[in-house]
Structures are given as structure tokens and as C-alpha cells.
Amino acid sequence: MPGGPRTLTELLESLRDSEQTITFADTGSTLAHRDLPVAAREVAGRLRALGAGPGDIVGLLMPTGPAWITGFFGAITAGAAVTGLPLPPVAPAAVVTHLAAIVRAGGVRYLLAAGIGVTVATALAEQIPELRFIDMDTPGTQPDDSDRTPPSAAPDTLAVVQFSSGSTARPKGVLLTHDQFVHGVTALIDHAGLSSDDVLVQWVPLFHDMGLVSLMTSLFTPYSAHLFGAKTFITDAAEVLRYTARVRGTIVCGPNFSYDRFIGAAAEAFGDDAADKPLAAWRLAINGAEPVRPHTVREFARVFGPLGVAEATMSPCYGMAEATLAVTIPRPESPPRVLTVDRDALAPGDLYRVVAADAPNAREIVGVGVPVPGISLRVTDSDGTPLSDGHVGEIRVQGPAVTSGYLGDDVVTGETLVDGWLRTGDLGLIDDGELVVVGRTKEMIVVAGRNFFPDDVEEAVRAVPGVYKGHCVAVADSDTERMIVVAETEAVPGTRGAEAVATAIRRAVSGTLALSAVTVLVVPPKALPRTTSGKWQRALIAELARAQLADRSSAAITRILREELARRFRCRVEHIDLAAPITELPGADSVLILEAIVACERRWKTRLDEDALAHVYTGADLRDLFERALA
């Protein structure tokens, strides 16, 4: 956007001439763009009265609402940087310990709080005495300086600290200057061709990079925006769809799971009223922040096509907080591309191969578009040497919207930013100029010379009967070269029903992927933790799963030994009777027994005495031997 605002303070002043508004759909309240500059100055005055100013980071602890936006620009007007702190709509007090760690690590001394955030801010202040906060629900009492001309921020000063959601690792504070942030927002505007005719309908929280940057595109362009709270979307996605139709929304954004919810809610939202094409205005469905499923892409076209939505509306993207948001997006009016490739040619350095959909090793992956303006992208080997198109390697990016580092973490900054390029930690390839993301570098495992990613396993498990709403997470365990699947089910753990679900999951993975190196853990519905933006907390789930598998109780040893024997003998777990002579179990032979023993030794990081093994007769003898070794 040549000639546009270069900083967020310049953006704020430009809004005086905007006729657009932000509507908060849950309450019906509105915030006019032209009212933002005065409102921001009032907040800035309150912050200055506390001592906040240049060099400080102000945390925002509020649900989506007018106070969040005026608070954001109030901190910017005071000369400070801003970080949006995660505030879940349910049980917000549960995040106090997590937030305290972020506040301390980030050196955050000032908070702006509203609604349920006030209770959390109060609890944080009790833990961190030097922390001070303003209750945005209470009018200020300091002298009004709303007519004071705000200082103009320099483009290279810190504007936003965007903490990662913690889905794959502990949250890190991404540093973004005014210049970097503005470049990131305007690149998205230019690539998508956004204009004053657009209408944003959004539920993604504003503390999430997708939520914040999407809203900012509506201020820079400017165009109107309609914001829902995340809880409304989770509980009533049908209403969000109906609302989108009523306001003729053109842009919606969210992670892949949100489109699965929309697909499931479409019939409730519109019933048989498809003849009027109620969603004909919808032209851009930004799908990012987690892997895009081919099934979702197809179902979106099938369900929403009759409602007036073009196939090209679905826009699978690739982005990250380190690049402000967007790295790649499909070319305008280009339908999503789904490639069917040989999964055994997706290791680093491989040249990918297209295969038939019914090929034994077929895997579908979705193209995520071309680089947005200003972003340079390359696929490299582990040393950073660029690879030619079609070869799998690490995705690296650079550009004016890319961060210069992480808050207070020079070590991670040095590891991530190498020779001016950001190492993403993702594997991908370039095909016809378009990026195709294969998976996370650290999540791929090789079993018997074949490559597997958690996404493949999850896709096979979601449709298994008994898996609650398809909720499952696969975790690669490189130490034992196996996948761990944690799935929600309404069957009570430890019962035959739960074991039946676990068996069905193993069969689905084996039948679909020919992968038998799978351990299944079943948990009650809603037990799998999500981030505050709705994604699975994969790092935490992996930690909990490995802790459970490391359980050395007699019951755990019995369960795992039976599973390993059943896998080798190619029989059902319930057919493994440890009281029987081990060589008489169905499908047993000495080599397979030894393989099961070695697998258990690797899992528990122990080694059984060979002399003692010579005296093993029954499965129970083997179990007792492991119990003594692990005691």
C-alpha cells in the first residue's frame, strides 16, 4: 500500500477520516473508526499516569470487545509495545500460572484488563507485586489529555510482542517493530485485493496473530468488521454462518477445525434455503494456523457450493507469528490444489512423486499458495543449501515482515535466524511456484524405511466409530520409532468398550497406512487440551502421553507387554493370555517374541538379564522379569 501509514500511530490518525465501523456481534455494540484516536488517547493518558511509556510492554487481558481495541491503540499511543495475553472464555482463572510465567519472562509491568480479565489481572498482581493494571471497565480519574498530540513512533521501534499459542512448544515472544507489523498487514491486503467493499466476520480471538492481523486489515484498507467471541462460535457455529449471510460477509478466517465446524453447522443454519444463495458474497475463507485437511477442502466445496460459495473461496494458507502472519496464500480466484504423492518420498532431500489415489503409499497434501508480497521463500537441506523445486526440505523465509528475534532469548534467536533467513522447522516443497507443507521436521518418524507424520495417522483415526467427534492427536515417538495416538471416547477407560475403540484405531491405522507401530491411549471426551485459539496443545499432549507410557506400575507393564506381543503376533490383545506358555500364544515364534522384548526394553530404557530370559516360560514370567528390572 504505497503512501499508506508506515506505523501504527500513523494508522490511528488516518482513521479520523474513515466512515467504517467495528461491530461486536454478541452485543450489537459498535466502535466507529473515527472514534478510535480520541479513545486511544484517553487510555494512553491513564497508562502514562501509571508510569508506562516507551520501552515498556503493555499486556492486554480482555475478551474481544471495544476495550481490547482502544487498549491496543492506547498502549501504542503511550509509546509502549503491546502483547495480547491469552484469555480463554471458560475457566480463565486456570491460566494464571501460565500467564505469570509470560508476564515475568516478558518484563510486562502494566496490564489493561476488562470483563473476566479483571479477575485474572487481580490474581496476577497478587503473585507479581510490581505488576500494575488498569480496569478498563472503570472510568479513569486522571486529567483528560485526549487532545494531546501523540508522539509519532519510529518505524524501527517495537510495536507488538506476539506470543506463540504453545501448540507445539512453550510460548515464545515474537518481536515485531512497527515497520515489520505494517508490512505484514499490508502484504495480506495487497495479495488478497482487499477493498472498502469487503466485510470481515471473525471469531478468532484478538490475542491470536490471525485474529489481530485480520482485524488490522480492516483498519488499514479500511472496511467494516464484525467480531464474535470465540465461545459463541464454539457453541453456535450455525449462528455465525447466518450472521455472515445477513451482513453479506466476504472474509472469514480460522484454523482448519473451524471450517469442519462450519461444514457441520451449515444444514442447521440454512436448512433447505439454499436457493437464494445466502452466502454468495463470501469470497475468501482463510484457512491456516494448523494443517489443512484435504477432506475439509472437498467438503467445504460440496456443502457451501449450493449456498453460493465459489470453490476458490477456500484459501489454504501458510503463516506464523514470526512473519507477522501470512507467508503464502493461493493466488486470487485459484481453487485449492490437492496433490496425491508417495508418502515414502517425503523425507528431507527426496524428490516427491505423484501417485494414483488408490496407490498403497498414497498421501494427499494441500498446496498453501504462493509467497505474499515482500516474502522470499526457499526450501533447503539441513545446512541451508537451497534445493530445486520438487525436493523436500526445511522451509526458510525472509522479508520485511519477518521478526528480528524472540523476547529475551538470544539462544533461540540465533538458532532460528540464520544468515538472514528464518528457519521455520517445517518440511515442504515447491511445486509450480506453490508451497506444499509436508509436516514438522521433528514430528516425522521412519519405521521400516517408511516416512510417517502425525497428520497421516490422525486422518485415518478421525472416522473410527467410538472416537468422540473425531477428536484425536498423534504424537511421533522417535525413540521407539512408533506413533502414539491419544483419542477421546465416551467408553470408560479400562473397559472392554474402550479396548474395542483402541483396537479399531490400531486396525484403521494399519489398514490405511500399513503402520503397525502404533500405541493407543483413550481418554474421556474433552480431555485433550487445546490452546486458547482452539488448536490441540500437541507438546503438552505428547508430554502427558509419554508420561503415561512411562508408567511402570504392574498394570501398565501388563498392558504394554500384551500390546507388543499382539502387534508382533498379529492377533488381538484380548487373545494374549500371559498365564499361557509364551511360545503357544497365537502366531508366536522365537523371533517375534524377541522383537517384542526388545521393543519393551527400548520403551522402558532397560535391558533384561539374558540368563533370566532363559528361564521364561509364560508371558507372566516375562512380565515379572520386567517388573523386577524396573523396580
Image (cartoon, rainbow, N blue to C red):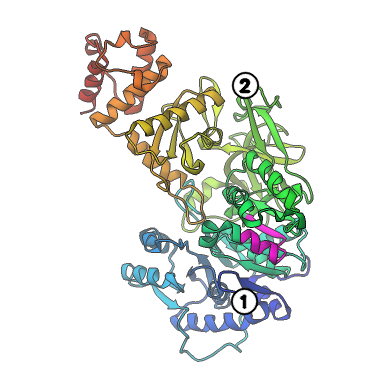
* Residue at 37%, 11% in the rendered image: 586
- Seen in the picture, residue 276 relative to 27 is either above or below; the reply is above
Which mark is first along the chain, 1 or 2? Answer: 1
Residue 242, by quadrant, is bottom right
- Identify which residue, 555 or 321, lies in the foreground: 555
Residue 249 within the magenta-colored segment of the rendering: yes
Residue ranking furthest to the front: 272
Amino acid bearing label 2: Pro
Q: Is 552 left, or right, of 533 in this rendering? A: left
Q: Which mark is residue 360?
A: 2
Q: Residues within 10 Å of mark 2 (few under 14, many from 20)?
A: few
- Where residue 214 sits in the image (x, y, percent)? 64, 61
Residue 364, by quadrant, is top right
Amino acid bearing label 1: Thr
Q: Is 108 left, or right, of 332 in this rendering? A: left
**SS under mark 1:** strand
Q: Is 326 left, or right, of 89 in this rendering? A: right
Any part of residue 245 in sight: yes
- Where residue 448 sits in the image (x, y, percent)? 51, 19
Q: Are marks 2 and 1 in contact (CB under 8 Å)?
A: no
Residue 368 within the magenta-colored segment of the rendering: no
- Look at mark 1 in the image and give the residue it sits on: 30
* Residue at 58%, 37% in the rendered image: 439
- Seen in the picture, residue 600 relative to 470 is either above or below; the reply is above
* Residue at 47%, 86% in the rendered image: 140
Q: CA distance from mark 2 to mark 1?
A: 55 Å
Q: Residues within 10 Å of mark 1 (few under 14, many from 20)?
A: some
Residue ranking furthest to the bottom: 143
Magenta-tinted stretch: 240-253
Residue 26, by quadrant, is bottom right
